[in-house]
Amino acid sequence: METQTNQNPEHPHIVIARHPKNMGVGLILTIIFGSIGLLYSTVVGGLIMTFFVQPVLMLSLITGHHILSILIALFYWPICIYWTIKAIKTYNSKLFAGEDTNENIDLSLSSIIMFLLVSTFIFCGLFAIYDQIISKLG
């Protein structure tokens, strides 16, 4: 048996070991802590759900739009749970395939504009549903 040694001391061999993310841990954290638990699965998803959706939910509660708050809350938790499952599956499949598992954040102008447009569309849709419900009740 032949032992290989590094002949070039300027370029040492570096091995980085990564472990797969545990689906059970991710789900438990997300179910208990919501978007904060989502940070285990995906940092980007956790930040979006924490700093975008929660302020909208709090604003709708403060302004007295309780039905809108209920609608947002009904969709908030399932979206976090789905995002956890999808993120862990993607991370683990990339890890086992030997691909880069880092979350690449696209901060191009077009992606920022698209995010703002989609989030505005979703918010307006929820508000329209809320407005229809209120007009039928009142």
Image (cartoon, rainbow, N blue to C red):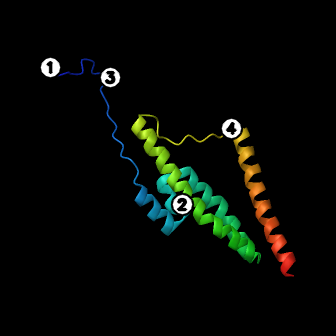
Q: Extreme front residue here?
A: 136
Marks 4 and 1, how far apart at CA? 50 Å
Specify the label residue 108 is tagged with: 4
Q: Is residue 43 positioned above or below 105 on the image?
A: below
Marks 3 and 1, how far apart at CA? 21 Å
* Occupied quadrant, residue 12: top left
Marks 4 and 2, how far apart at CA? 27 Å
Mark 4: give few (<14), some (14-19) or many (20+) Cα within 10 Å: few
Relative side of 26 to 15, left or right: right
Give percent across and percent down for residue 17: 33, 40
Marks 4 and 3, how far apart at CA? 35 Å
**Residue at the disc numbered 1:** 2
Measuring 55% from the left and 57% from the top, which residue is drawn there? 82
Residue type at mark 4: give it: Ser
Comparing labels 4 and 3, the label whose residue is closer to the camera:
4
Give percent across and percent down for residue 63: 77, 75
**Residue at the disc numbered 3:** 11
Quarter of the image where the C terminus is located: bottom right
Nearest the viewer among 71 and 114 is 71
Q: Earlier in the sequence, mark 4 or mark 1?
A: 1
Mark 1: give few (<14), some (14-19) or many (20+) Cα within 10 Å: few
Measuring 58% from the left and 65% from the top, which residue is drawn there? 77
Comparing labels 1 and 2, the label whose residue is closer to the camera:
2
Marks 1 and 2, how far apart at CA? 50 Å
**Residue at the disc numbered 2:** 81
Measuring 45% from the left and 41% from the top, which residue is drawn there? 93
Measuring 50% from the left and 63% from the top, which residue is drawn there? 30
Q: Earlier in the sequence, mark 3 or mark 1?
A: 1
Q: Earlier in the sequence, mark 2 or mark 3?
A: 3
Q: Of helix, strand and loop, which one carries label 3?
A: loop
Residue type at mark 1: give it: Glu
